[in-house]
Amino acid sequence: ISQLVRTNDNDDDDVDATKGLCTLETLIPSKETMRELHDRCNSRIAIVTGRPRKDCDKFLKQHGLDKFFDVCVCMEDGPPKPDPFPVKRACELLGIQPSKSVVMVGDTPDDIRAAIACGCRGVGVATPENAMKSKSDGNSHDSDKLCLAMKNCGADIILKPGLQGLLDIFISPPM
């Protein structure tokens, strides 16, 4: 899972002037969705982010999500997306081979490019802001320029914000 958060564009970490970027991030999926995905993926879910590890760890702990992610590949680990390295490294750390059965979810064209270049399935997710704007314009959630760019980069589908649509991709194992 690449993108769990949307951020304010201000990344000024001067605490006296503004809150740091990490404190301005908001959670996109619900904890229930993440718990269900974690269960359906046999506990093999990774975060691939261009953010520093300390920010990633802080955010996951702050939102009670750290227990759902076995692996975090962060900016310190190697070349950033769209290079396939971070996706490939996440697969290595999870003990799986990159393939079309591995889903990389992201909200930027670089996320999709990295997934495709690694041999994984690229699934886009519309940002809440863009989906709301598209809806207010009378269009589908995936009609904005960013979603169209992700489709042009090879995204199989563009999910609505919240990642609930991933539950349709990862079917529950039979009881």
Image (cartoon, rainbow, N blue to C red):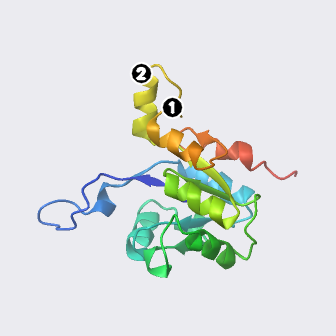
Question: Which label is found at residue 64?
Answer: none
The three-letter code of the residue at mark 1 reads Ser
Q: Are marks 2 and 1 in contact (CB under 8 Å)?
A: yes
Image position, residue 158 (x, y; %): 59, 41
In which quarter of the view is residue 159 placed?
top right
User: Is 27 displayed left or right of 140 in the figure?
Assistant: left
Q: Residue at x 67, y 52 (%)?
A: 36
**Vertical comparison of 89 with 23: above or below:** below
Q: Earlier in the sequence, mark 2 or mark 1?
A: 2
- Return the residue nearer the eye: 151 or 94: 151
In which quarter of the view is residue 129 placed?
top left
The residue tagged 2 is: 137
- Return the residue nearer the eye: 53 or 110: 110
The three-letter code of the residue at mark 2 reads Asp
Crowd class of label 2 (few under 14; some 14 to 19; many from 20; radius 10 Å): few
Crowd class of label 1 (few under 14; some 14 to 19; many from 20; radius 10 Å): some
The residue tagged 1 is: 143
Image position, residue 140 (x, y; %): 53, 27
Image position, residue 104 (x, y; %): 62, 58
**Vertical comparison of 130 with 61: above or below:** above
In which quarter of the view is residue 63 placed?
bottom left
**Vertical comparison of 119 with 175: above or below:** below
- Could you tell me which secondary element the residue under label 2 belongs to? loop
User: Is 49 displayed left or right of 12 in the figure?
Assistant: right
- Return the residue nearer the eye: 64 or 171: 171
Tally of marks: 2
Q: Residue at x 66, y 66 (%)?
A: 118
Q: Residue at x 53, y 66 (%)?
A: 48
Q: Quadrant of the N terminus?
A: bottom right
Confirm whether residue 117 shows in the render.
yes
